[in-house]
Amino acid sequence: MLGERTNLFPQLLVIMGGLAVQGGATVKLKIIVAATIVTAALLTPQLHAQTLEIPALPAPIPGPATEGQVLPLDLMTAYEMAMSRNLDLQVGRFSIASADAGVQTASGVFDPNFGFGASGDWTRTPSTTVLEGSLVPEYRNIRYGLGIDGLLPTGTLWSAELGTNRFETNNTFYFLNPNWTSDLNLSVTQPLLRGFGTLVNRSGIVVARNSRAQTAEAFEMLVVDTLRQVESSYWNLVAARRAVQVSEQSLSLAERLLGETQERVNVGTSAPIDLVQSEAGVATRRQALITARNVASNAEDVLKTVLGFDQPAEWLTTIETTETYEFAPFLPDLATSIETGLEKRPEIRQQQLRNEILEYYVRMARNDVLPSLDLQAGYGWGGVGGKGETVDPVTGDPIIVDEGFPDSVDQIGNRDFPNWRLGVQLGIPIGNNAAQGRLAQRRFEHDRSVVEMAALQQDIIAQVRIAVRALEDGAAAVEAAIASQQLAARNLEAEQTKFDNGLSTNYQVLEIQEDLAQAELTLIRTYLDYRRANIGYRYSTGTLLDFLDVGIVDPGQPDIPNDYWKDIEWLQFDDFAGSGEPAVPAASADTAP
């Protein structure tokens, strides 16, 4: 029977048919017992044949769950409600959206910067020499400039600037007055060692993508935890309400026994002292019923919290659980289960992402140890225009100039007056203790992460082993609890018959009634424990989403416009020893995690 699917409804029909010829408390007792077996089978639910899709990005929260006083709720509906309304999941969705924005923010490092500026000044000072061309020289400057600059993934700093300056003075030695001086300059600075390559300069994007991937894994773990909470809360409520029914029926049996004892006392077949035992049994069961009802109310509130009830009116709603069940024990293979857990647990993938980004940090730190060697180059053109009069040095003829700003720009366009510069700048830190210390620190962090991965794998293996044993032991416990409950029912039936024939006492009947109640509660707990073991096994192997047919709809890593040259291997330079290694963490690439 352990490896078979057991439908408990035929058991109820057989028991009810066999009791049709019996009467009194025994018939009522057996029907109650059989109903308890059926309704308390908290095992494998018959889920809806559909996939529950959970958005990974923020979505509107649905309104109140119901406007009535009763909310019929099966397990799939509970999943859907929790996935759409649970506030912890909403927080997780905003974390993913924030991580998406972080990727876009990091890509802004390669956005070009455009600038425009204008300024002016005027000075008037007394003259101290005839060479100043005026007793009180005055100088007026108006400057305009615009430019664009940016950073390339190789570390190249580039810029283009166009500027002009209008100068005017009362100094008689200036033959162009006012005059316009314009220039166009292009410049490039390229690191050749420290700061060179896409490894270092794309670090912000790689870290942001890795962080986004880790956030997505954390959201999956949050979804799994929420589903487990829904499972636990739902079945706890079902079990608590079944316990209420058991307590009610136990009280009913005690009250029936009290009535029968009262009749015996009235006719003189029992002593009045027997009433005390029966009354004490009724009082004890009433107290147990009050406790059971309080536990059920608390269990309902816990489920409402997990489902995301946040309106006062919703808390007045009564949840009516409607799920049906079948007892379907299974014995998974331990080796396969461990392999599956090490492959599919989101904690493993998240730790892999941490290892990858820490390895990336090590390579960045290696590059930071290198000396700086920068190639600097620039090229440009200039032009001058203005208004004035001078003499041709060859012919002696007067030359009148009245072109101004357009003439200075034309000279730039005609490339009449070019200029260039080229240089190399080398910087060698003495000792370089800061960079060496950071490199050592990053290596230790990476080595620690590797050990953490080993510890995580060890923990997952232990969890899977415990989960498999829990399934094996849980199935056996269910079989034992069913047998124990059936024997307790038969024992009470026999004791009730003896009591009816005057061969037993009230105390003995009450004790055996209590034994039956405890057996029924134990049966409920074993069913609940097996269901928890089932879900615990799916959790430990990372297959809970597949088992419940739940999917997370995640659009993946956001596209960014200027993350280029990342796949050119020779540009992924950190130092001469490690430039051939993979530079970008695989899980932090453009593809969705």
Image (cartoon, helix red, strand yellow):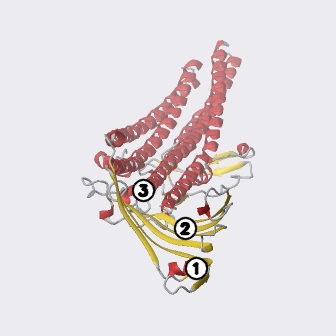
Side of 376 relative to 268 (left or right) = left
Residue at left 69%, top 21%?
262
Q: Which residue is mark 2?
A: 147
* Cα separation between marks 3 and 2: 29 Å
Q: Relative to 470, is 221 above or below?
A: below
Total of numbered circles in the picture?
3
In the rendered structure, which disc, 1 or 2, sits on the residue that comes first in sequence? 2
In the rendered structure, which disc, 3 or 1, sits on the residue that comes first in sequence? 3
What amino acid is labelled 3 in the image? Val
Q: From this viewpoint, is residue 355 visible?
A: no
Q: Which of the two residues, 294 or 38, is positioned nearer the viewer here?
A: 294
Q: Position of residue 371 (x, y in %)?
A: 32, 50
Q: Which of the two residues, 197 or 309, is positioned nearer the viewer here?
A: 197
Within-10-Å neighbours for mark 3: few <14, some 14–19, many 20+: many
* Cα separation between marks 1 and 2: 34 Å
- Image mark for residue 586: none
- In terms of secondary structure, where does tag 2 sit? strand
Q: Which residue is mark 1?
A: 390
- In terms of secondary structure, where does tag 3 sit? helix
Q: Position of residue 18 (x, y in %)?
A: 52, 43
Q: Which residue is mark 3?
A: 206
- In terms of secondary structure, where does tag 1 sit? strand
Residue at left 67%, top 67%?
170
